[in-house]
Image (tube, rainbow, N blue to C red):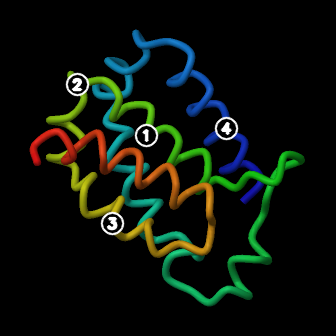
Amino acid sequence: EETTCAAAALVSTLVSRNDDVHRLMAKSRLVPVILNRLVLSTCVVSSHKECASSYADFRGASADDYFSATVRDLSHNSAQHKLLMASGGVESMLTVMQSERRVARINAACALANLVGKEE
C-alpha cells in the first residue's frame, strides 16, 4: 500500500504540474487503471474502520486522494474529456463520491463538474 501511495503521489504531481503529461497518460492507458483502482478502494467498498486503517503518507493523503486528484486535473483539460468518459470516469467519480475520504470526494465532485457540468 505504501508503494501504491507513493506512485499515486508521483503521478498526481506530474499531471498537476505539466499539461504535456496529459497526452502521455492517455497513451500509457493508465487512466482506466486509475479509475478501476478508485472504484475498488477499501474506502469506497468497505466500512469506515477499514478505511481509517488504510495507509496514508506523512501529509495524511492516501492513494485514493492522489488518484482522485489526478482524475480531477485531467478533467480540467478538455482534450481528455473523451478518454475519461469512455473509460467510465463519470461512473467512477460517482462511486468515489461515496468514499470515506473527504479529499477524494471533493476531487470527484470537481471532476464531475468538469466532465458533465458543462453539458447541463
Q: List x then y, in percent, for residue 77.
A: 31, 23
For the residues marked 2 and 3, what is the alpha-carbon distance in whole angstroms?
19 Å
Residue ID for mark 1: 72
Q: Is residue 60 left or right of residue 47?
A: right
Q: Are marks 4 and 3 in contact (CB under 8 Å)?
A: no
The local crowd at label 3, few if under 14, some if 14 to 19, many if 20 or more residues have their Cα within 10 Å, is: some
Q: Please report whichever mark, 2 or 1, sits nearer to the chain's N-terminal start.
A: 1
Secondary structure state at the residue bearing disc 4 = helix
**Numbered label tally:** 4
24 vs 39: above or below? above
**The image quarter in which residue 119 lies:** top left
Residue ID for mark 3: 94
Q: Which amino acid is tagged 2?
A: Ser
Q: Is residue 15 left or right of residue 77?
A: right
Secondary structure state at the residue bearing disc 3 = helix
Q: Please report whichever mark, 1 or 4, sits nearer to the chain's N-terminal start.
A: 4
Residue ID for mark 4: 9
